[in-house]
Image (cartoon, rainbow, N blue to C red):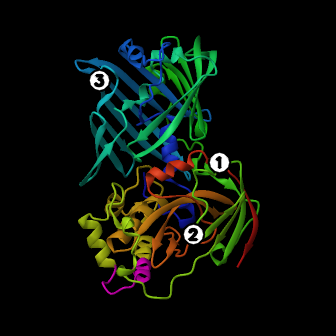
Amino acid sequence: MAVLRIKRNWIIGVGFVALFLLLLAVRLDVLHWGPYRLFPSGDGKSSYVSGVQGLQEKESWMNITQNGQKIGYSHRLFSKTEKGHHLSESVFLQINTMGVVQEMAIKTDGDLKPDMTMSSFDFDLRSSLFRFHAHGVVNGKQVTLYTETPGSEKKTVLNLKDAPQLANGILDSAGIAEMKEGESRSVNVFDPATMGQRPIKLTMLGDDAITIMGQERKARKISVDFMGAKQLAWIGEAGDILREQGILGITMERVTKSQALEGLTLAAGADLTQIASVPSNVVMDDTAALSMLKVKLTNIDKANLKLNGGRQTLRKDTLVVQKETIPTRPFRAADIAGNEDFLKPSPFIQSDDPKIVSKAMEIVSPDDPLSVRAAKILSWVYKNVEKRPVLSVPNALETLNNLVGDCNEHAVLLAALARAAGIPAQLEVGLVYQRGRFYYHAWNVLFIGTWVTADAVMDQMPADVTHIRFARGEADQQIDLIGVIGKVRLTILDKSR
């Protein structure tokens, strides 16, 4: 694919949350744990093990479509081993973001004990430019997780409440048949790509009949609710998944191998960025000159969102965003007391990596106040990172190596360089206005004596008031947007210069 030079306003709206939604839609890379067992027996004791012991070796192929157009396929193989079971799942996708069609290949492998608890797993995602690889080893209730990018590996130890199990196998289990119509079950899920944990709710909707590969099949219809993002699944009498249908217009359906491998071309399907965007009732020009924006937000659950605080004030459904000012006093590293946690490295913001530290020291001078350091780093990222939509799990080191990416790559690299330069930094995600619509976007907030927003895609510090924060934090916090996308209604009530 030819390298594209994309204007900065075209890059708005490609968010990591869209990628996570896509992965959720095809049920990839999700583990669940907790003291709750999904399929209890009639005597109240867990019968989850007995439900999975009946699982035989099986292989399945599925077409993946978006609003009726084929965008990929999946291949899944479940087999027995000497120590239990092995699950292998491969997915190939062609995704349209801002008119650019990109290929993405995802491979998930899990070694399972006889009771379906995990002993190890491996997850690999590759796209046109980027690769993300994570693997883990389970020891009782502890997972040692390794996240890899070219030239770097980070180790994270996670302590769990119970031994992890593979959620990819939840809908395959014969125990699903034990649920009664109208019955709901909840379980926590963990995603190693974001290291975030959230609840998922399954509800048995009842018996149904669907046509699969030209034949009518009896099925049980299940509702899968992940933080307000709802999917439907149809489970056959043998416990096999026949169809899944849900967010972003994505459907997976059981097909033959030849059907899965045919009919896939690099056609421009539905644009994820456009589908997720929110129309504006007011067309705005020169948004950088605005000092205040008042909007009404409806049709969403605000409980898990970070709408109130800092430059944002929320009262019921009305949100007011006030533009910050850069502190005039020259704050220095000694003035960051209380915000030291936001200098620490993380698996995706590798601020302690020698390459990141060296680049930060090259950009700033030791005597620079925090605000000057922040401005220099913002300008460097804006000028040097090519603005191009990518599909990957964004991380700072790989972005520095490739110097290309969308808003997420800009944000993680800015955060890493800022932390390496002694500036506490966080990520923010939400909406930003462009061309008559609000698009999902990622930017930063930097502590330079006070917290100030900074957008390396738009070269703004402070960011304009159309940047409406929904979540603050790293990838695990971005999951909170899942219940918002496709639902939020936004009305501009007032604005001023």
Q: Residues within 10 Å of mark 3 (few under 14, many from 20)?
A: some
Determine which residue is flagged by label 3.
113
Q: Residues within 10 Å of mark 1 (few under 14, many from 20)?
A: some
Membership of 394 in magenta stretch? no
Residue at image x 30%, y 40%?
143
**Residue 85 in sight in this render:** yes
Q: Quadrant of residue 219?
A: top right
Q: Are marks 1 and 3 in contact (CB under 8 Å)?
A: no
Looking at the rendered structure, the kind of residue marked 1 is: Asp
Residue at image x 58%, y 11%?
217
The segment highlighted magenta reads: 364-376
Determine which residue is flagged by label 1.
301
Q: Position of residue 306 (x, y in %)?
A: 57, 58
Q: Nearer the viewer, residue 474 or 263?
A: 474
Looking at marks 2 and 3 on the same chain, the residue that comes earlier in the sequence is marked by 3
Looking at the rendered structure, the kind of residue marked 2 is: Gly
Helix, strand or loop at disc 3?
Answer: loop
Q: Is residue 227 left or right of residue 129?
A: right
- Label 1 and label 3: CA atoms lie apart by 39 Å
Looking at marks 1 and 3 on the same chain, the residue that comes earlier in the sequence is marked by 3
Q: Quadrant of residue 105?
A: top left
Looking at marks 1 and 2 on the same chain, the residue that comes earlier in the sequence is marked by 1
Residue at image x 27%, y 65%?
352
Helix, strand or loop at disc 1?
Answer: loop
- Label 2 and label 3: CA atoms lie apart by 48 Å
Q: Quadrant of residue 247?
A: top right
Quick check: 284 above or below 366?
Answer: above
Determine which residue is flagged by label 2.
310
Membership of 374 in magenta stretch? yes
Q: Position of residue 152 (x, y in %)?
A: 25, 54
**Residue 266 in sight in this render:** no
